[in-house]
Image (cartoon, helix red, strand yellow):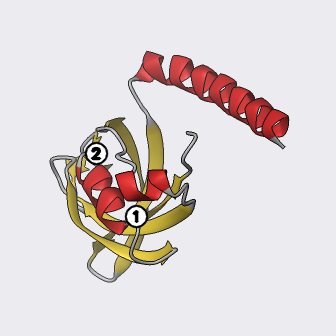
Amino acid sequence: MRVIRRCKSAALLGFLGMLIAGAALSDVLATNTGYYVSGDKKFSVECSLVGAGALRYPPKARKYKYVGQVVVAFSIGTDGKVVDPHVLDSEPPGIFERSALSYVRSWRYAPPVHEGENVQVDDVAVRIAFQPGR
């Protein structure tokens, strides 16, 4: 089991290394999709994450080796800052929510653009996984 985890971790780190190396060229860490509403039309807008703080693993969760995930929804403002992050789901409940929200608040996106104008994008959702050995 431990060997499998190490192999998975090594493969994941290798993949992330390639992803980050490729992303370094464009200064993009990840791309998320949100929606911009203009009148009665809804447009899908890709948003590029360009900066993020560190994900803090709660000390008590680390001590007891809790594993979990949190789904966070938010908007991205015209300046690229995360607006109104809130938890949609968490497993297990009551353990990782505060860390996930703090982490998402630290994110910075390239300002979302639709038809040449900076716009606010809504309905962006991400899943953040917590594993003690990561």
Image mark for residue 96: 1
Q: Quadrant of the C terminus?
A: top right
Q: Nearer the viewer, mark 2 or mark 1?
A: 1
Whether residue 41 is situated above or below residue 103 in the rendered picture: below
Query: In the rendered image of this protein, does residue 119 appear above or below residue 18?
Result: below
Disc number for residue 107: 2
- In the rendered image, is residue 85 in sight? yes
In the rendered view, tell whether residue 113 sits above or below residue 45: above
Q: Residue at x 52, y 74 (%)?
A: 92
Q: Residue at x 40, y 64 (%)?
A: 96
Amino acid type of the residue that numbered disc 2 sits on in the rendered structure: Trp
Under circle 2, the secondary element is: loop
Q: State how far apart marks 2 and 1 are (Cα).
A: 17 Å
State which tag comes first along the sequence, 2 or 1: 1
Q: Quadrant of residue 97?
A: bottom left
Pointer 2 with pointer 1, Cβ within 8 A? no
User: Residue 80's x, y, as percent?
Assistant: 22, 47
Q: Would you call the spot at circle 2 few (<14 residues within 10 Å), some (14-19), or many (20 or more)? A: some
Q: Nearer the viewer, residue 21 or 94?
A: 94
Task: For label 1, count other residues whose C-alpha is less than 10 Å away and answer few (under 14), some (14-19) or many (20+).
Answer: many
The front one of 112 and 103 is 103
Locate residue 17: give its quadrant: top right
Q: Amino acid at mark 1?
A: Phe
